[in-house]
Amino acid sequence: MDAIKAKLTTTFVEQEDGSEQRVINDQTVLIYRPPGRVVGLTFLITAVSMPVSKYRSIIQALTETDHAVVGVYTNLNPNHREKAERIPAMFEELGPEFRVHKYDIVGHSIGGKIALLAAALYDADENKIRSIVALDPVDQTPAEFTNPGQLKRSLMSKPADGAAGGKANLSLEDTAAAITVTCTDTGYWIKKQHNGREIQRLNPKNVRLIMQRNSHHMVYCDDDGVLSWKSLAGKGSSPDRNKAVKDEALHIIRENAAKATLSGQSKARVTSLVGKAKKAVNDAKNDLTEIGNDAQKLGNEAKQKGNVMKGMASVRGLFG
């Protein structure tokens, strides 16, 4: 019964946009496949209540770079850590299916925070996350990388009586993933002490920060005529600036994905060259063996012919 249930939960339902809807590890996802061979796999984690369909530009940028895209819709439940824990669990099933050994994550807003949680909490030993692009991540409700109580204590030699408490901040120093974080002029509900710039300030060694000023939090989404959180996140300084910021983000995502693509193509070329080299060696061995056999055969024939001639000479001697 469990096997049947597992099969049912991973059976895909084709959508109008060509994606496959599946349920993996209790998470509903939309899978977009590239037209050719898959050389990379990227999880795309949305902002809260933002449909996957509003990230069409990002999906296209990834599939054009030969990545399969797993769209993960972010709602209010379960909590951020549970959502992050599902990512490596889903990869356990999808990795063998797509024949990839590592994966990438693109996350937006809370989705960016979830991506960073996956690296900080669930990948230190596995090192299967190749890269993360966190688009304007929001570390709130709760703050886990930018905890204010921990920040206050770090400024004191000794905690004063009544000092603010709080858990220690999570660190990104133990992950091998290449992490890029962007930061815009945030929406009115997003606090600057919990944005991407602050996350990078506390993890300077392996987090690259891209400042995208004079734009807004939802600039990475596509318009599809449906009212959403995007209408509450400001408009940026101008349409031209917003377009430039979005184009820059897409360039970063393509560039990141291309590294996996080039790696995959290089491995394929190496495998092909090794295969050809092995074939050439084997062919050479076979040729040498064949030449050796021919030489031995000729030698045997010559020996036999020599024995015959010797015998004839002996006969002539008897009758001469």
Image (cartoon, grey):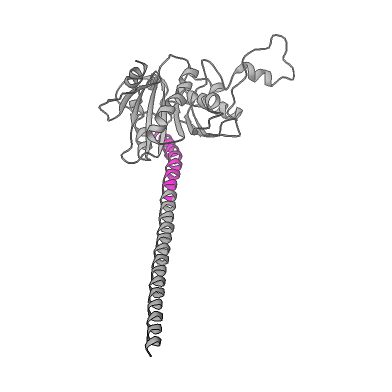
> What x and y, as percent, mark residue 104?
45, 33
* 306 left or right, relative to 159: left
Q: Residue reaching furthest left?
A: 16
Residue at (46, 35) in percent of width and height: 101
Q: Is 295 placed above or below 214 here?
A: below
**Most distant residue in the right direction:** 157
Vertical arrangement, residue 168 with respect to residue 285, above or below: above
In the image, 147: left or right of 12? Answer: right
Apparent side of residue 37 relative to residue 117 in the rendered image (left or right): left
Q: Residue furthest bottom?
A: 320
Secondary structure mostly taken by the magenta-highlighted segment of the chain = helix
Where residue 292 sits, quadrant-wise, is bottom left
Residue 62 in view in this figure = yes
In the image, residue 242 lies at what x, y percent? 41, 33
Vertical order, 85 against 283 (above or below)? above
Camera-nearest residue between 268 and 42: 268
Residue 268 percent across, percent down from the top left: 41, 47
Identify the residue at horizontal 43%, vertical 64% (top origin).
288
Residue 55, picture quadrant: top left
Q: Quadrant of the C terminus?
A: bottom left
Which quarter of the picture shows residue 289?
bottom left
Quadrant that contains the N terminus = top left
| Residue 18 image position (x, y, % from top left) | 27, 30
Q: Is residue 155 magenta?
A: no
Along the viewing direction, whichever of 96 and 210 lies nearer the viewer: 96
The part of the chain drawn in magenta is 240-269
> Which sits in the foreground, 237 or 4?
4
Q: As rendered, which of 279 and 61 lies closer to the eye? A: 279
